[in-house]
Image (cartoon, rainbow, N blue to C red):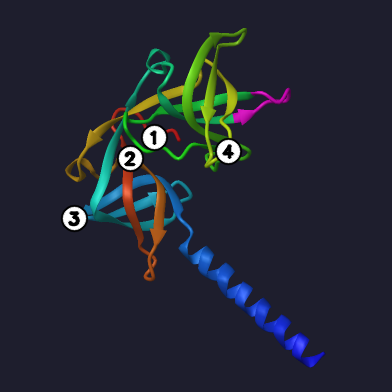
């Protein structure tokens, strides 16, 4: 019995350390405003009001978020769509961001943290059909070896639509709104960033 209890205790401790380690390495999203730029170090005020330090990797990619229109959302285009579930089970788009051609997009559908209960769908546009309240997009996504899945998402006149322009680190300035999808927290609390988007003529809506 003693050996069994000890084994269980060791297993529990290992599980706790594994969970803590996984949490420590979990990627972090950042939405906020640049307050100061010092080389590759950005001082950012998050949307929650937290002061953050973002360290850009030497090869970090920078993209400018610019306005787009529904005409740019064509079949075959890869998009990310933030949506809100409706009472009837349908999805209504809050925003659509059109990914750059050739970008390796992580196709998926699941919870998103833009606002409570929001969802994110990353995939390829298949069709766009006029509906009663707007345009209905059919978006397909393929996760791993699973068969392709699809979502139908309503786009209304209130849906924000953007795309990305290539940019450089030199374009990052104080006062700009930024979005980072996948930052890694370093031991000193600094967030290491491999890719960052800034609002050129519109704040990143995703």
**Residue 154 relative to residue 56: left or right:** right
Kindly report the distance in space between the C-alpha atoms of the residues bearing marks 3 and 2.
17 Å
In the image, what residue occupies the spot 22% across and 51% down?
A: 59
x and y, in percent, of residue 21 in the image: 51, 69
Question: In terms of sequence position, does the residue under pointer 4 or pointer 1 come before the other?
Answer: 4
Kindly report the distance in space between the C-alpha atoms of the residues bearing marks 4 and 3.
43 Å
Outermost residue toward the bottom in this view: 2
Name the residue beneath numbered marker 1: 204
Instruction: Say if 176 sits above or below 66 in the image.
Output: below
Kindly report the distance in space between the C-alpha atoms of the residues bearing marks 1 and 2.
7 Å
Give 149 or 39, whichever is nearer the viewer. 149
Question: In terms of sequence position, does the residue under pointer 1 or pointer 2 come before the other?
Answer: 2
Say whether marks 1 and 3 touch (CB < 8 Å): no
x and y, in percent, of residue 9 in the image: 70, 83
Name the residue beneath numbered marker 2: 197
Question: In terms of sequence position, does the residue under pointer 3 or pointer 2 come before the other?
Answer: 3
Name the residue beneath numbered marker 4: 146
Q: Is residue 85 magenta?
A: yes
Kindly report the distance in space between the C-alpha atoms of the residues bearing marks 4 and 1.
31 Å
x and y, in percent, of residue 28 in the image: 45, 54
Look at the magenta stretch and give its main secondary structure.
Answer: loop
In the image, what residue occupies the spot 26% across and 49% down?
A: 60
Give 168 or 17, whichever is nearer the viewer. 17
In the image, what residue occupies the spot 44% across and 55% down?
A: 50
**Residue 105 relative to residue 10: left or right:** left
Name the residue beneath numbered marker 3: 39
Question: Around disc 3, counting alpha carbons within 10 Å, would you say few (fewer than 14), some (14 to 19), or many (20 or more)?
Answer: few
Q: Which residues are magenta?
A: 84-90
Give 110 or 155, whichever is nearer the viewer. 110
Q: Which mark is residue 96?
A: none
Say whether marks 1 and 2 touch (CB < 8 Å): yes
């Amino acid at each position: 019995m003693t050996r069994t209890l000890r084994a269980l205790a060791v297993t529990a401790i290992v599980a706790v350390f594994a969970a803590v380690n996984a949490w420590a390495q979990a990627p972090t999203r950042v939405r906020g405003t640049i307050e100061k730029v010092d080389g590759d170090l950005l001082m950012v005020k998050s949307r929650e009001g937290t002061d953050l330090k973002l360290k850009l990797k030497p090869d970090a990619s920078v993209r400018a978020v610019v306005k787009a229109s529904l005409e740019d959302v064509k079949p075959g285009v890869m998009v990310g769509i933030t949506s809100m579930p409706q009472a009837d089970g349908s999805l209504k788009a809050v925003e659509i961001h059109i990914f750059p051609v050739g970008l390796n997009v992580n196709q998926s559908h699941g919870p998103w943290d833009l606002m409570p209960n929001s969802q994110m769908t990353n995939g390829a546009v298949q069709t766009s059909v006029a509906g009663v309240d707007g345009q209905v997009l059919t978006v397909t996504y393929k996760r791993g070896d699973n068969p392709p899945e699809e979502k139908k998402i309503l786009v209304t006149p209130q849906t924000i639509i953007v795309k990305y322009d290539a940019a450089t680190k030199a374009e990052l300035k104080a006062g700009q709104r930024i979005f980072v999808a996948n930052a890694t927290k370093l031991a000193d609390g600094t967030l290491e960033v491999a890719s960052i988007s800034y609002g050129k003529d519109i704040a990143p809506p995703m």
